[in-house]
Image (cartoon, rainbow, N blue to C red):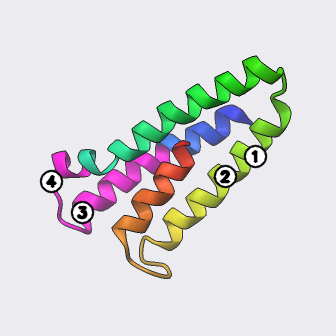
Amino acid sequence: MLLLLHGHYMAALFYVLLYFQAVENISATGAGVRVIPNLVCSVVGSLLGGWYMQRYGRYYYLCAFSYLGMVLAMAIVVLSSGLVISSSTIMIAGLSLAGF
């Protein structure tokens, strides 16, 4: 399951970058800059998750919560891509939440 979720996340990240370039007419560099918050949240989330697991020795609820958060965040990304609202700020926030 972990492999499938992260595979879908990487594919979504790839297509969101293409969306920024094609729909919003932004350069590849500009699209890459827009995913920097996602990268920062991924690093912070990994460090906090590792600290939590090391300190408390529990990981089941942490993993379940992170999978639920990723699904909800990707729903935010899909809905903000023009399905309900067209907002790149909300899309970037959703990607950052999915990375966390």
Instruction: State the mark number for residue 22.
Output: 3
Circle 2 residue: 69
Q: Relative to 80, is 59 above or below?
A: above
Q: Residue at x 34, y 47 (%)?
A: 35
Do the numbered discs 4 and 2 sit on residues whose CB atoms are within 8 Å? no
Residue type for callout 2: Gly
Taking depth in this image into account, of 65 and 13 the one nearest to the observer is 65
Badge 4: residue crowd in 10 Å (few <14, some 14–19, many ≥20): some
Instruction: From the top left corner, tell me how far across and down residue 82 is, in percent.
Output: 42, 77
| Residue closest to the far top | 54
Q: Disc 4 to disc 2, how far (Cα)?
A: 30 Å
Question: Does residue 8 show up magenta in the picture?
Answer: no
Task: Count residues near mark 3 (Cα–Cα under 10 Å), then give few for <14, some for 14-19, many for 20+.
Answer: few
* N-term mark: 4 or 2: 4
Q: Which residue ends up furthest to the front in the rendered image?
A: 55
- State the residue position of label 1: 65
Closer to the camera: disc 4 or disc 1?
1
Q: Nearer the viewer, residue 31 or 38?
A: 38
